[in-house]
Image (tube, helix red, strand yellow):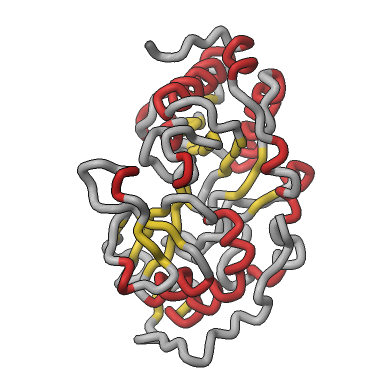
Amino acid sequence: MQNTSTRDGVLPASFRVSHANRVIDRDSGARKIDLVRYYALVGKLMLVHLRGRPVSLVRAPSGVGGELFFQKHAESSAMPGVKQLDARLAPGHPPMLAVIGLQGLLAAAQWNVVEFHTQNALASAYDTPNRLVFDLDPGKGVAWPAIREAAVLLRAFLTQLGLPAWLKTSGGKGLHVVVPIRPQHDWETVKAFSQAVVAHMAQHIPARFVVKSGAANRVGRIFIDYLRNGRGATTVCAWSARTRSGLGISVPLAWEELDQLKAGDQWNVGNVHSRLDVGNAPWNGYARSAKGLDAAMKKLAFSPPA
């Protein structure tokens, strides 16, 4: 993955931002124009992760703390650089969306989009996902060192299964472990396999992990969210901002950096310059590392759904 960005966040001369000085995050004082410039700054880095994937957009017209609108479908004519995908990919629903260039990022931000989420399959091969995502979602009372350790434990088990594991911050309170896979199995099989991985972790380390979602189930423990692997489900894209206090961002990490990581929102719209020189370099080799799931299924004694 190339380590490139616009570095200065300069907007095209013809691009106009309405209500540019409207504060969208009271805690940091960030304005709408700051967010738009942020996406100009990281656009090339982010497009590597957006390329070819259906996206969902989280709009926050009233900023952090206001009402959010999660949109998988929208009129793309309002956002140059955002296109509608083939309607046959989601029969019975309006066409899904894809961001096809920096212009799309900026147009979406002008439309009050803060977060960009991506699905686990490319639009060109939508019926066969090409990645797994495990979202480490800590319950009440889980300290940050325990979240870091949880990522290490999950990686160790994935390594036993012969699967590569890549790491990124969530931009919120947790971490994401991402597994590139060859697009060979359908959504149902991939989701069921990811659930089996989480069930194994919860069974063997029940003091740390739970397989059931819900706040009451994970007090003092971590839910490894496998539900991100279902058809149509999404995960926040690398370099996307979050609609949270401080406007944290999701950032690719090297595993060697984990010990020094202080929080899932360590980087944000305001301090991203301290990360630009690293960029996507921690994920160099991501695409080439993809493995098929058959051998891992056999090691886990997993049988695909009938």
Q: Give the x, y percent position of residue 306.
A: 37, 11
Q: Which residue: 48% across, 74% down?
A: 103
- Quadrant of the rendering where the N terminus is positioned: bottom right
Extreme residue toward the top, this view: 301
Q: Is residue 219 visible?
A: no
| Foreground of the two, 277 or 242 | 277
Q: Give the x, y percent position of residue 132.
A: 54, 34
Q: Give the x, y percent position of residue 18.
A: 36, 86
Q: Which residue: 29% across, 53% down?
A: 95
Side of 94 where 108 appears, left or right:
right
Q: Which residue: 41% across, 75% down?
A: 107
Extreme residue toward the left, this view: 92
Side of 25 where 160 appears, left or right:
right
Q: Quadrant of residue 214?
A: top left
Q: Give the x, y percent position of residue 52.
A: 51, 52
| Image position of 110 with respect to 192: above or below | below
| Foreground of the two, 177 or 79 | 79
| Image position of 266 with respect to 105: above or below | above
Q: Is residue 181 visible?
A: yes
Q: Which residue: 46% across, 14% down?
A: 304
